[in-house]
Amino acid sequence: MVSQIVSAVGVVIAGVFACALYYWLSDKLLQIIFPVPKENVRTASVNLNRRAVVRPWLFLGPALILLGVYLVYPVVATFILSFYDRSGGSFVGFANYRWALFDDQFRQSIFNNILWLAVVPAACTFFGLVIAVLTDRIWWGNIAKSLVFMPMAISFVGASVIWKFIYEYRGGNETQIGLLNSVVQFFGGNPQVWIAMPFWNNFFLMVILIWIQTGFAMVILSAALRGIPEETIEAAVIDGANGWQIFWKIMVPQIWGTIAVVWTTITILVLKVFDIVLTMTNGQWNTMVLANLMFDWMFRGGGDSGRSAVIALVIMAAVTPIMIWNIRQANKETGGH
């Protein structure tokens, strides 16, 4: 454990030192290529302008190269693979796209993803906003916020294991150890295999992600609420507005941009949801989503690179416009252009 910490710290220090050294050497190289002679004002002025033009690209060079290698190249390679067979050796044209259009499991995955998109971002944003407003009005609000935010520190797999115990079902006359079935049994109901109930089991899985992400929404929205001028709230109170009116007509309109950013950020996460479904059901009982279907086709029967590439492209096509819109909204919120 100690050696891992030391190695991690060493890597961080070495990385920072390497970056600083690169920037220093780059600047020195610019000074050599474009000198600024004191005796020739014209040459000095031209070279200073050239340095100003080249320097940003020189400094951004490593980042652009890494983006090209780890982002642009995989996208292009995935697009090309989508036109090849399972081994990636024979060109099959649009056969993989035709498969996607008529495959029942692919359509089920699309439906489930739409269901997740309709419920999870809205629920996380709503609960996060409500908790942010309520916790600002009580003296133990910071403690409550810490408890709500705590699930953010848990991995998706860890959270799934926790909720697997909550949904646990024991057959026959065995004692129910699952919290939900124990409560149902206490009130005279019959225990159920909750995660094996088609359609409704999707909502039981969504609860896990809502539990994790509500803390994120709460923190961002709480910061936005604190940015609302107190004079605005006081003026509304003097004018006779009640708490409900202040919330919907004063608070929400003033932080609408932040609400939109939070909602779209969670939307992007939902489109990539994978760990929860894999851990809880492995896509069984009509719970398959696109990310899990892609993973499944990557390894099913030795793997099918063509079909998995098509699913990956669908996910990227869905994520990209939302991500672009999210960045633009964030720029507006921070005063950028």
Image (spheres, rainbow, N blue to C red):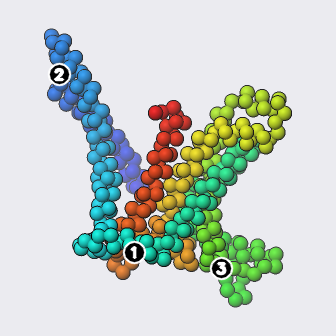
Residue type pointed to by label 2: Pro
- Residue 301 x, y percent position in the rendering: 36, 81
First in residue order: circle 2 vs circle 3: 2
How packed mark 1 is, by other alpha carbons closer than 10 Å (few <14, some 14-19, many 20 or more), is few
What residue sits right under mark 3 in the picture? 193
Of residues 115 and 98, the one nearer the viewer is 98
Which circle, 1 or 2, is nearer the viewer? 1
Distance in Å between CA atoms under marks 1 and 2: 61 Å
Q: Name the element at disc 3.
A: loop
Distance in Å between CA atoms under marks 3 and 1: 33 Å
Q: Is residue 290 above or below residue 64?
A: below
What residue sits right under mark 2 in the picture? 35
Q: Is residue 145 above or below residue 288?
A: above
Residue at image location 49% in from the left, 65% down from the top: 274
What residue sits right under mark 1 in the picture? 99
**Residue 21 seen from this side:** no
**Left or right of residue 257: residue 18:** left
Q: Quadrant of residue 313?
A: bottom left
Q: Quadrant of residue 111?
A: bottom right
Of residues 291 and 154, the one nearer the viewer is 291
- Residue 214 x, y percent position in the rendering: 63, 53
